[in-house]
Image (cartoon, rainbow, N blue to C red):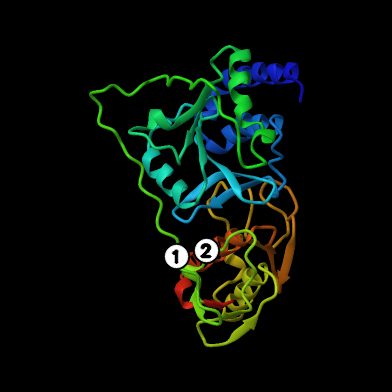
Amino acid sequence: MALDELLHLAQLLKERMEKYAASLRQSETRTRYALIDPLLEALGWDVADLNQVVAEHETGGGRADYALLRLDGKPVLFIEAKALGKSLTDGLIQTLGYFITGGVRFCAVTDGAQWEVYDLTKQANNLSERRVVEFNLADAPNEFIIKALWLWRGNHIGGTPTTAPVPVQPAHPVSPSQPSVPLPAPPPPAPPPAPGAWTPLSQVTPKSNDPPPQALRLPDGTEASMTKWFDLPVEIVKWLSGKGILTPPKCPIKKRPTAKRDLVSLTPVHPSGRPFFQDKTVGLFYIETHYSARNHVGNVQFILSHLGQDPSQFSVRF
């Protein structure tokens, strides 16, 4: 998109924000559709392409509303979205803490109008020193776009984005009298499982290029062979439905009421109206399987917990 078009988009988003402010303040989902998604799309991120953007991404300690992916499929930036007008600082330390557990360098928090981007790896005494860039729709459109270009996909897909040569000063700097708020340190990496050993599903944290398990052991002692990562949700849904734990009235299953995508449904269509990107069927149930290895594990952990099952009672063997 040319700079003139980006400038026009900034003006359009500002007008949209002012016209529908009352409605956007009531809903994070509306804010995402009306303000956040259009900006990401204009900056090269196809929010419908799971090779570029994954919504509701499990980070290990929480969930990112968006994970922006590099060409190798690894997240380069997490985004926490809020309804228009919501404070960006509410719960920010906790949010950044579980983003750190997701192993990502950059994260952003936004209410659709204000954007703040942080470098989680930077050594600093307070949050303002970790801030890479901030911008606001209330700014002049040209200033907004110049700063927003830091999010341009071309600046991130290689994994080494270029930051502004002069740090952007925070709108509300931390005064010397305010105590510093250190971020929690990343947890030490878990040791890899021994070859052939059974690992509880609750302890599995695969990377994007890790091979899938060879087998899944279920709580009743039965085992199922696996050749692809999507075999994991398929086999678990098959077992849950066979035991009468998963029934049609319990569908659809999604990670939260406002989620744009279903994990398991009776029809292969998401709440947004989009068809499943890659569906597998088990009896009456459709399973969305277009996810990364890490997301597959997070999804089945959620499905099991949602249905009252303990993920630690399910094991895999690599």
Q: Image point 29% across, 33% down: which residue?
A: 180
Locate residue 163: give its quadrant: top right
Image quarter in which the C terminus is found:
bottom right
Dot 2: element: loop
Q: Could you say where residue 150 lies in the image, as x and y percent from the top left?
A: 60, 28
Drawn side of residue 43 relative to residue 138, left or right? right
The residue to which callout 1 is attached is 190
148 lies above or below 196: above
**Could you classify mark 1 by the number of other residues whose Cα lies within 10 Å: few (under 14), some (14-19), or many (20 or more)?**
few
Asked if labels 1 and 2 touch by Cβ distance under 8 angstroms, the answer is: yes
**Could you classify mark 2 by the number of other residues whose Cα lies within 10 Å: few (under 14), some (14-19), or many (20 or more)?**
some
In the image shown, does 166 or 148 lie closer to the viewer? 166
Q: Image point 52% across, 86% down: which residue?
A: 220
Q: Farthest residue toward the top?
A: 140
Locate residue 293: give its quadrant: bottom right
Q: Could you say where residue 90 lies in the image, as x and y percent from the top left?
A: 38, 35
Residue 62 visible in image: yes
Q: Image point 54% across, 81% down: which residue?
A: 218
Image quarter in which the N terminus is found:
top right
The residue to which callout 2 is attached is 205
